[in-house]
Image (cartoon, rainbow, N blue to C red):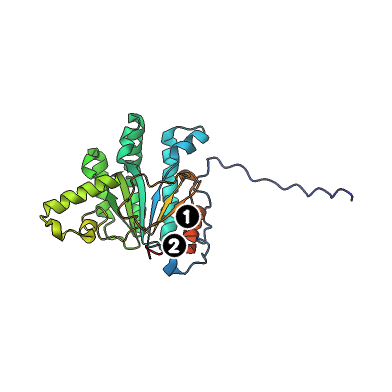
């Protein structure tokens, strides 16, 4: 057989000036429809955002730049959750164990959080997002605490999506704080049941997560919502957090819809 003629040369688009993060950007017309009935979507999605530092090292940039890239993925994920009509989204942003990282990295994380809150609060309010903090707010620097309190107040009327930011959070610490609150209320031991404990947790009044997503390939909860996730579906993907975007989010939603939840039955 003779050699086929070479196809005509096609001009290649210029390379982007900046690294792309949050893969799978949505078209301007909105997200592609999912073959999932609305009632089969999770009401509460919780995400362990893992892989910022590995992403930074793979791209030859600083850890701080990796965390900044992770913030871009937060923006994309939040917008997509609103478009997919997910009522509750919880993001694991900073654990109590993260205090053991270098002072420079911790300071950079706090600076990034404060800047993000200042810059993003107007858009959150416009999108109908209500922000709630899960964690020990009193342990945070005054500037960070003030920024968070302002965001909570300015988004309190949001009714499209409840965004919970787990910051200075630990699942065991949350249970300790719940027990202390129960003791403060003077509730007798014989009157304490699962509902009593749930009502004393940081997440009181919210549905338990239906789906917990962890990026970066790890297979553990890392002290995240350990009471609330007792019956959650766990989904791990290899995508590092800065590369997590609408397509990766939809893959998790599709996998969730394929599973049968039995709750021990």
Image spot of residue 188 (x, y percent): 11, 57
Image spot of residue 253 (x, y percent): 47, 59
Residue corresponding to mark 2: 84
Q: Nearer the viewer, residue 191 or 158?
A: 191
Quarter placement of the C terminus: bottom left
Tell me the residue at 41%/49% (across/down): 74
Residue corresponding to mark 1: 249
Other-residue count near label 2 (Cα within 10 Å), few / some / many at <14 / 14–19 / ≥20: some
Q: Are marks 2 and 1 in contact (CB under 8 Å)?
A: yes
Q: Which residue ends up furthest to the right in the rendered image?
A: 1
From what the image shows, is residue 95 above or below residue 76? above
SS of the residue under disc 1: helix
The quadrant where residue 39 appears: bottom left
Image spot of residue 237 (x, y percent): 49, 49
Specify whether 158 is left or right of 38.
left
Tell me the residue at 36%/40% (across/down): 112
Other-residue count near label 1 (Cα within 10 Å), few / some / many at <14 / 14–19 / ≥20: some
Q: Which residue ends up furthest to the left in the rendered image?
A: 186
Q: CA distance from mark 2 to mark 1?
A: 10 Å
């Amino acid at each position: 057989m003779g050699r086929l003629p070479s196809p005509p040369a096609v001009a290649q688009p210029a390379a982007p000036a900046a690294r792309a993060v949050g893969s799978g950007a949505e078209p301007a017309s909105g997200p592609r429809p999912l073959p999932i009935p609305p009632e089969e979507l999770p009401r509460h999605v919780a995400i362990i955002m893992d892989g910022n530092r590995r992403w930074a090292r793979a791209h030859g940039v600083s850890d701080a730049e990796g965390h900044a890239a992770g913030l871009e993925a937060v923006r994309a994920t939040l917008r997509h959750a609103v478009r997919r009509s997910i009522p509750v989204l919880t993001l694991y942003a900073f654990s109590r164990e993260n205090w053991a990282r270098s002072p420079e990295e911790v300071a950079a994380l706090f600076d990034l959080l404060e800047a993000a809150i200042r810059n993003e609060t107007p858009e959150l309010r416009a999108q109908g997002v209500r922000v709630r903090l899960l964690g020990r707010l009193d342990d945070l620097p005054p500037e960070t605490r003030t920024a968070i309190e302002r965001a909570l107040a300015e988004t309190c009327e949001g009714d499209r999506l409840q965004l919970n930011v787990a910051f200075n959070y630990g699942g065991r610490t949350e249970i300790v704080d719940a027990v202390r609150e129960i003791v403060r209320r003077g509730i007798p031991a014989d009157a304490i049941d699962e509902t009593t404990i749930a009502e004393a947790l940081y997440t009181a009044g919210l549905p338990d997560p239906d789906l917990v997503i962890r990026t970066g390939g790890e297979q553990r909860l890392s002290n995240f919502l350990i009471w609330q996730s007792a019956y959650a579906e766990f989904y791990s993907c290899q995508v590092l957090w800065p590369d997590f975007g609408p397509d990766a989010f939809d893959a998790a939603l599709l996998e969730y819809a394929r599973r049968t939840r039995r709750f021990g039955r």
